[in-house]
Image (cartoon, coloured by chain):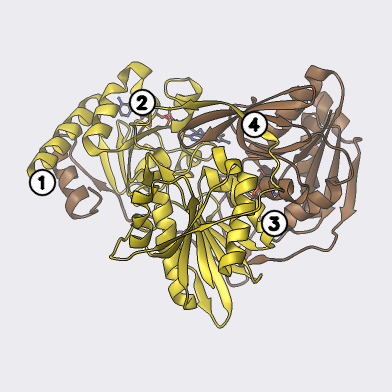
Chain colours: A brown, B yellow
């Protein structure tokens, strides 16, 4: 089984966020970047588990991003991916990413393309569905469990009213979330092996720029907290009604 | 020309998030000098379609096809694409919810439309420039996106604006679509529906959430009581779902659900950054915690330093008293 996993590079949640060039650019200086948790913990690890269970196949990670993101790609190789592809571009949006991954994947015969539920910096949840449409493949959105038996994948998915169990013919695209697997920490052997695993750089091909970020605004902090006497919950209720106007 | 909105029902009502999306579309339609057309499954009870008119739709396109059953996203994307062509729509609106996350990206590819997922404000349309704001970096910032393509799709983050209903009617117009390209490669084997009498967390205006400070799952009774007294949904921090004290769909935060209710009450939750990432868009935050140094107090509007086991029942009583006096 050949599996492709899309991985993205995101600022750690604890990072301080700042902008430059008159608030038009995100300031990467001093920011710790990580593999998007959904991609690392769920899509990548589940892909590795499926390969290991079969005892055959390969897991390729793909990233659309600049050279400086290769440290992140090496981490994915250290966790266990067999090889990596980097499409050399600073992506404008999800459409841009999906288009580049689709162009790469279309004639490579992947049985399964896994992506994360969403990136934790923009939370769009678009790339997987776009890839499926571009490649004319079935798409399973927000899978929390995934098993493969022969040519058929069985996935458990989130719905508003509960969960559903879906069966899908491979090849297919799937977005992965919590429940699918547990995070893996790369060990020394993995880190050593990652240095020599293949990382292919592919030039960007005919990108579409359909959207772009014009400016950023920092969210204003909340006003100072108002402390309420724990013995006076009537006061809290009155404030929620009269001041906050939420009840 | 029109602004098209994808809408759905839940428990035989138009979904709250769909009414929000129709309101949102009406704002855009007014700016573009056009009208709103809602798209809905043809199986919908005709008696409830009137609500779409009240929310601002001038027309409702109903589509009936066996392939749309179970919400088949590819079939829906093809159907909405055809509805947009038939109605001359260049802007399509969704609610940024679970169903739309499967349909909207496919539609964006079919229409070659720039899409902004999770918008939090009405767009600005000036001199042919179309821009819209969405949240970014775990709620620490917002980003303004310009959509350059002729066709545009926006999904609106639920609870961004209060719903407005006014007098208004929509003409209902069935549309026949060609779904021959929508072969079904995904089959639904089983549906496990949850307790549907509970308030749905993503759409809830009031949320009562609790964490490790509750000590064990057996203590959630006082959390449920407070939620019931308010008519609120219940939520929890990640360790609570990880330990199976509460179901996974209640887990909010960076790796769980992001919510932005009008009121979020956090009980026995320390306020780690990964938790705040999923709740800091809430309009008002109340924190109840024994530790006056708990980081959550810095992100709160109202704080109570105290033991949840004493404070929460007291708050429930106060809410009941308030409700009794106001109804
Ligand atoms: C990459 C990553 C992603 C994560 N994603 C999420 C996420 O999505 N959501 C999430 O919630 N967490 C997430 N976490 C975990 C997060 O960092 C915290 O560990 C977690 O939120 C803590 O949960 P808690 O506040 O319930 O527990 P604790 O941190 O243990 O806090 C318990 C609180 O209860 C208070 N307390 C104790 N007894 C009482 C009492 N009797 N009455 C009132 N208060 C009391 C204590 O003072 C304390 O503040 C993530 C972590 C990482 C590293
Ligand atoms: N630049 C990228 N390169 C490779 N994969 C990506 C990239 N951006 C997003 N993805 C994948 O698409 C998923 C969803 O991203 P998004 O639609 O942007 O929320 C992520 O979890 C990744 O798996």
Name which quarter of the figure residue B169 lies in: bottom left
Spatial distance from mark 3 to mark 2, Cα to Cα?
46 Å
Evaluate whether residue B260 shows in this view. yes
Nearer the observer: mark 3 or 2; the answer is 3
The location of residue B181, given as percent across then percent down, is 72, 48
Task: Looking at the picture, tell me which residue is in the foreground, A241 or B101.
Answer: B101
Parent chain of label 3: B
Work out whether mark 1 precedes mark 3 in sequence or the reverse, and give the earlier one.
Answer: 3
Spatial distance from mark 4 to mark 1, Cα to Cα?
50 Å
Work out whether mark 4 precedes mark 3 in sequence or the reverse, and give the earlier one.
Answer: 3
Circles 3 and 2 in contact, beta carbons < 8 Å: no
The residue lying at 54 percent from left, 34 percent from top is A158
Secondary structure under tag 3 reads: helix
**B312 is higher (above) or lower (below) than A120:** above
The residue lying at 55 percent from left, 52 percent from top is B137
* Residue at image mark 4: B187
Nearer the observer: mark 2 or 4; the answer is 4
Q: Is residue A196 left or right of residue B241?
A: right
In the current view of this chain or complex, which residue is farthest to the bottom?
Answer: B127
* Residue at image mark 1: B326
The location of residue B268, given as percent across then percent down, is 35, 30
Task: Looking at the picture, tell me which residue is in the foreground, B140 or B227.
Answer: B227
Circles 2 and 4 in contact, beta carbons < 8 Å: no
Secondary structure under tag 4 reads: strand
Q: Any mark on residue B109, and which?
A: 3
Nearer the observer: mark 1 or 2; the answer is 1
* Residue at image mark 2: B213
Work out whether mark 3 precedes mark 2 in sequence or the reverse, and give the earlier one.
Answer: 3
Q: Is residue B102 left or right of residue A185?
A: left
Q: Is residue B56 left or right of residue B224?
A: right
């Amino acid at each position: 089984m050949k599996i492709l996993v899309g991985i993205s590079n995101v600022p750690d949640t604890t990072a301080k966020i700042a902008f430059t060039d008159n608030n038009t650019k995100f300031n990467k200086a001093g920011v710790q970047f990580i593999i998007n948790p959904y991609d690392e913990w769920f899509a990548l690890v589940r892909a590795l588990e499926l390969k290991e269970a079969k005892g055959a196949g390969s897991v390729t990670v793909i990233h659309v991003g600049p050279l400086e993101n290769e440290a992140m790609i090496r981490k994915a190789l250290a966790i266990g991916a067999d090889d990596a592809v980097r499409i050399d571009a600073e992506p404008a949006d999800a459409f841009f990413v999906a288009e580049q991954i689709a162009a790469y994947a279309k004639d490579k015969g992947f049985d399964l393309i896994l992506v994360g539920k969403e990136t934790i910096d923009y939370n769009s949840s678009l790339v997987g569905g776009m890839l499926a449409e571009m490649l004319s493949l079935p798409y399973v959105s927000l899978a929390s469990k995934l098993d493969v038996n022969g040519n058929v994948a069985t996935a458990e998915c989130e719905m508003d009213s509960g969960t559903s169990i879906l069966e899908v013919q491979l090849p297919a695209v799937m977005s992965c979330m919590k429940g699918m697997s547990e995070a893996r920490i790369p060990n020394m052997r993995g880190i050593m092996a990652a240095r020599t695993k293949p990382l292919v750089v592919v030039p960007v091909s005919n990108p579409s720029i359909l959207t772009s970020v014009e400016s950023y605004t920092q969210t204003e902090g909340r006003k100072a907290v108002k402390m309420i006497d724990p013995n006076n919950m009537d006061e809290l209720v009155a404030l929620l009604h009269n001041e906050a106007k939420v009840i | 020309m029109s602004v098209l909105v994808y809408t759905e029902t839940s428990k035989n009502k138009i979904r709250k998030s769909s009414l929000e999306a129709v309101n949102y579309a009406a704002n855009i339609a007014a700016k573009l000098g056009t009208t709103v057309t809602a798209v809905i499954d043809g199986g919908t009870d005709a008696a409830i379609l009137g609500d779409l008119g009240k929310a601002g739709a001038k027309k409702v396109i109903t589509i009936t096809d066996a392939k749309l059953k179970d919400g088949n996203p590819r079939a829906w994307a093809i159907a909405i694409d055809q509805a947009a062509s038939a109605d001359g729509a260049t802007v399509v609106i969704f609610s940024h919810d679970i169903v739309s996350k499967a349909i909207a990206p496919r539609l964006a590819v079919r229409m070659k439309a720039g899409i902004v997922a999770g918008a939090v404000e009405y767009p600005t349309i000036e001199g042919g420039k179309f821009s819209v704001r969405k949240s970014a970096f775990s709620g620490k910032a917002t980003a303004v996106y310009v959509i350059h393509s002729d066709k545009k799709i926006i999904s609106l983050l639920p609870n961004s604006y209060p719903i407005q209903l006014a007098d208004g009617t929509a003409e209902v117009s069935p549309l026949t679509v060609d779904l021959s390209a929508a072969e079904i490669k995904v089959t639904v084997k089983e549906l496990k529906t949850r307790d549907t009498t509970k308030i749905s967390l993503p759409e809830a205006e009031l949320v009562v959430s609790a964490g490790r400070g509750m000590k064990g799952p057996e203590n959630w009774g006082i959390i449920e009581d407070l939620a019931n007294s308010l008519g609120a949904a219940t939520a929890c921090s990640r360790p609570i779902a990880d330990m199976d004290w509460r179901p996974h769909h209640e887990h909010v935060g960076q790796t769980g659900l992001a919510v932005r209710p009008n009121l979020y009450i956090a009980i026995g939750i320390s306020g780690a950054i990964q938790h705040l990432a999923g709740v800091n868009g809430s309009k008002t935050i109340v924190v109840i915690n024994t530790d006056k140094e708990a980081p959550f107090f810095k992100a709160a509007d109202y704080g109570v330093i105290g033991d949840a086991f004493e404070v929460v029942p007291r708050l429930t009583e106060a809410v009941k008293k308030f409700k009794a006096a106001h109804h």
